[in-house]
Image (tube, grey):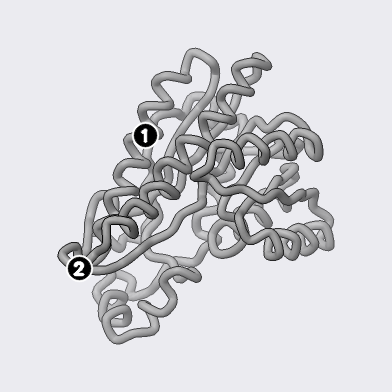
Amino acid sequence: MSVAGRVVLVTGASSGLGAVFARALAASGARVVAGARRIDRIEQLVARIRAGGGEAHGCAIDVSDPVSVAQAFDRAERLAGPVTAVLANAGMTNDGLALELDADRFRAVLDTNVTGVFLTMREAARRIVARGDEGRMVAIASVLAEKVVPGVAPYAASKAAVVQLARALALEWAPHGIGVNSVSPGYIRTDINQAFFDSRAGERLVRGFPRKRLMQPDDLVPLVTLLLSDGASAITGADFTVDDGQTL
């Protein structure tokens, strides 16, 4: 399960799960390149990782823009070396009932959550294939890809698309030694959902879970680390649900 020395690009690393993943991978010896649009937060994250003895670099990236994505990989290569692993974590949501949801807000979710994953992984794959390397890629999906609740149509649709996109890319890139998988987490308190879980509706949802609790971000770290390591050489095209039994 070692990721020591592997150059890993983590998108959406300015907060939430992305920041957790970046810190954990660096602590395991990976050479982390943390990317997001909020570069001020990325700089703070990089400083924190370095203060703890890890190796990290930051880059600005808008995953929905192919030019920005390519520039981020150029910077990553200059600072850390060839990227051989990608954790496509960048995501957003625009909640609301479908009858009241503006089309532009729907498209914005798909642009980041689906197109962003595609552009990030494609850029990595192009460079990996050109070098003749092997690679590891993980996309963060969601249990909402399978089991939906009211008011999350764009997010749920995007995450279902991410699962199938990862499978499709895994099939295309398997001959090149590139493994592509997705991880579908259950409910975890993050910046984008904390207001909901502080509400009565959120509290009611948690009480309905078998263990009556939310997951912790660190619960995903062991699996993500495995999938980005050499230990995952025979794992590709799979989606892994990690939800503390919430969907049982």
**Residue that numbered label 2 is attached to:** 100
On residue 165, the disc is 1
Return the x and y of residue 17 as percentages of the image width and height.
54, 59
Mark 2 belongs to which amino acid?
Glu
Report which quarter residue 118 is drawn in. Answer: top left
Name which of mark 1 and mark 2 comes first in the sequence: 2
On residue 142, the disc is none
Q: Are marks 1 and 2 in contact (CB under 8 Å)?
A: no
246 w.r.t. 197: above or below? above
Could you tell me how far apart the alpha carbons at marks 1 and 2 are, in whole angstroms?
Answer: 28 Å
State the residue at coordinates (41%, 71%). 193
175 w.r.t. 50: above or below? above
Q: Residue furthest bottom?
A: 200
Return the x and y of residue 123 as percentages of the image width and height.
57, 30
User: Which mark is nearer the camera, 1 or 2?
Assistant: 2
State the residue at coordinates (43%, 66%). 188
Q: Describe residue 143's horizontal placement relative to residue 233 as left or right.
A: left
Report which quarter residue 43 is drawn in. Answer: bottom right
Mark 1 belongs to which amino acid?
Leu
Callout 2 environment at 10 Å: few (<14), some (14 to 19), or many (20+)? Answer: few
Callout 1 environment at 10 Å: few (<14), some (14 to 19), or many (20+)? Answer: many
